Amino acid sequence: MPTTKNSDTLLLAFILLISLCFSCNFSQKETTKKNILQVDYYVRYLQADKQFKVNISFTEIDSTKKIMPRKMEEVLFANKVLNGKKIGNQYRYQLATQMPFSENYGLTYRLNQTEIDSLAIPIQAMSDFSIKKGKVSKTAGTNLMFVGDEQSSKETLVLLFSDVNNKTATIKIGNHSQNAPIIILPEQVRHLAVGKGKVYLVKKQTVQTASKNLALTGLTEYYSAVKEIEIIE
């Protein structure tokens, strides 16, 4: 009888030990789950000055959806080091520089001494554009034409006009047919003064992707050179 009791005690102890091992193993797996790294970037390119402005921030999202700012050891854009500083509750990495344009730029960030990751930031160039005789009509409407191919599937174009009095007109163009003229309606520029003016185009492209441990949200803006125009009735 004592032998049976001892056997039962040993069996119970063994079961508890196995349960504890499984529990510890499950706990370790839970704690080793990686947080999601959220990367947010904004890149602006001025065609006339060949100037870039870059703004990047990093945050981590844990399993409870808690969002925490993430500081990086080093951040590079096109192999140029970004200046990092804490603004509010975020670490922001910024760069303003002149360099030749390319349609793909590398973003590299060092999480610590051993972990380095990189990703690509695409920026599509803008085709040149023209307005017939450089005249914008306040009554008849105006066509803006692209010189060469202009992709339009995922981008948003923004037209910005200004007159001699620095009054402005902003026209947002989305989902226009590829290489079709952009029609500027009279009511869109009616408030502008007759006389000399200026126009430029901005191409905006947004990116939003997610993988197992990375979420990426980005906005790029390509600013064309400014063109002189004449605003007429």
Image (cartoon, grey):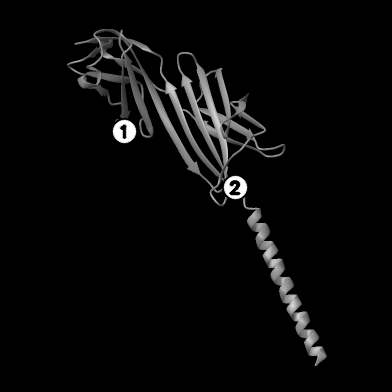
Q: Mark 2 points at which residue?
A: 35
Instruction: Judge whether 152 appears above or below 194 on screen.
Output: below
Q: Is mark 1 on a helix, strand or loop?
A: loop
| Drawn side of residue 137 relative to residue 62, left or right | left
Q: Quadrant of the N terminus?
A: bottom right
Residue 124 at least partly seen: no
- Residue visible at 52% across and 20% down? 52
Please provide percent x and percent y for residue 208. Answer: 46, 39
Q: Which residue lies furthest to the left in this view?
A: 139
**Residue 53 horizontal/vertical position (percent):** 52, 22
The quadrant in which residue 99 appears is: top right
Can residue 219 be seen here? The reply is yes
Q: Which amino acid does label 1 sit on?
A: Asn
Residue 185 has which mark? Answer: none
Residue at the (78%, 87%) spot, across then down:
5
For the residues labelled 1 and 2, the Cα–Cα distance comes to 36 Å
Give the mark nearer the N terminus: 1 vs 2: 2
Residue pictured at 71% horizontal, 68% vertical: 20
Residue placed most toward the observer, 205 or 26:
26
| Percent coordinates x, y for residue 183 in the rendering | 24, 23
Secondary structure under tag 2 reads: loop
Apparent side of residue 142 relative to residue 223 in the rendered image (left or right): left
**Quadrant including the C terminus:** top left
Please give the residue where the numbered disc 1 appears in the rendered image: 175
Among all residues in the image, which is located at the extreme bottom? 1
Q: In the rendered structure, which amino acid carries the disc numbered 2?
A: Asn
Dot 2: few (<14), some (14–19), or many (≥20) neighbours within 10 Å? Answer: some
Q: In this view, does 196 lie to the left or right of 7?
A: left
User: Could you say which quadrant of the image residue 96 lies in?
Assistant: top right
